[in-house]
Amino acid sequence: MSFTGQDDPFLQAQADVLSTLKTTRSLFSSYLRIRSLASSASSPELAQARSELESTVQDLSTDLQDLVDSVKAVEGDPFRYGLDIDEVGRRRKLVQNAGDEVESMRQELAKTVTSAQSKSQGMNGTLPPPSAFDPEETDGDDYGVFEQQRQVEMMHEQDEALDGVFRTVGTLRQQADEMGRELEEQGEMLEDADRLADRVGSKLQNGIKRVGWVIKNNEGMGAFDHSTSRLSD
């Protein structure tokens, strides 16, 4: 059994991953731009950009899982599916690169949470300004503090959900590493088999030559004996 371009599950999963990855990159660039311009880590615009990015990353992790499954389906006997070791290695490398790119996004997303925590701790650890005790402005300030704390809590919840996604991506990368080691072992076994076949073939050729030499010598001796017997007659 061998795959054609239309029924190869990897090629279908690869198309999904590359498409989702393209969208994720665009959202990630937009997120970084908004973060650089935001005056606060609890900015609603920043929270929305982060939420959209996280949702797309979740879709990407699902597509990556399909990609890994398609590689694992053929890695045991790639030749059966019309694939060679180099092609399987290329597919594994694609999974690793996508996982690394998603990991770098996770690190950038974590920076926002750290920044929000620092600002929240700084807010709680300093004395309020004198205007905070103005009866006419207390309600507004309280609402601002409450809103900022609520945004920080939402970001914490989003980060916990995203951690689950990245744990999945980490598992995928680990599986890709394991596939790489197995492919290397298969490659070494194939090289050993080729060397053994070469040695056996060389010995077989030498054996055939020796048999041919013996046959020729026997034929020569037979002709010599026949001519000798005729002369004696």
Image (spheres, helix red, strand yellow):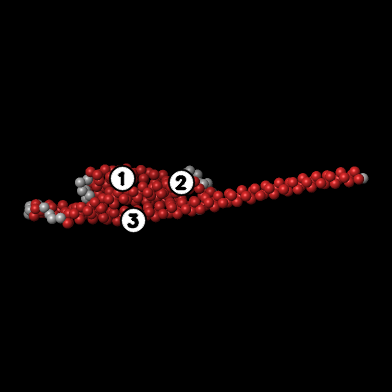
Q: Are marks 3 and 1 in contact (CB under 8 Å)?
A: no
Question: Can residue 229 be seen by looking at this rendering?
Answer: yes
Which element carries disc 1, helix, strand or loop?
helix
Q: Earlier in the sequence, mark 2 or mark 3?
A: 2
Q: Residues within 10 Å of mark 2 (few under 14, many from 20)?
A: few
Front in this rendered view, residue 212 or 157: 212
Q: What amino acid type should be assigned to the residue bearing mark 3? A: Gly
Q: Residue 171's spot in the image, x, y percent?
A: 39, 55
Which element carries disc 3, helix, strand or loop?
helix
Q: Residue 148's spot in the image, x, y percent?
A: 19, 52
Q: Residue at x 43, y 52 (%)?
A: 176
Q: Which mark is residue 164?
A: 3
| Horizontal side of residue 117 vs 87, given as left or right | left
- Using the numbered discs, state the Cα–Cα distance from disc 3 to disc 1 in whole angstroms: 19 Å
Q: What amino acid type should be assigned to the residue bearing mark 2? A: Arg
Q: Earlier in the sequence, mark 3 or mark 1?
A: 1
Q: Residues within 10 Å of mark 3 (few under 14, many from 20)?
A: few
Which element carries disc 2, helix, strand or loop?
helix
Q: What amino acid type should be assigned to the residue bearing mark 1? A: Phe
- Residue positioned most to the left: 135
Q: Residue at x 92, y 45 (%)?
A: 233
| Horizontal side of residue 110 vs 196, given as left or right | left
Q: Residues within 10 Å of mark 1 (few under 14, many from 20)?
A: many
Would you name the residue on which mark 1 appears? 28
Would you name the residue on which mark 2 appears? 90
| Horizontal side of residue 90 vs 153, given as left or right | right
Front in this rendered view, residue 161 or 119: 119
| Horizontal side of residue 194 vs 184, given as left or right | right
Q: Residue at x 44, y 49 (%)?
A: 92
Q: Residue 208's spot in the image, x, y percent?
A: 70, 47
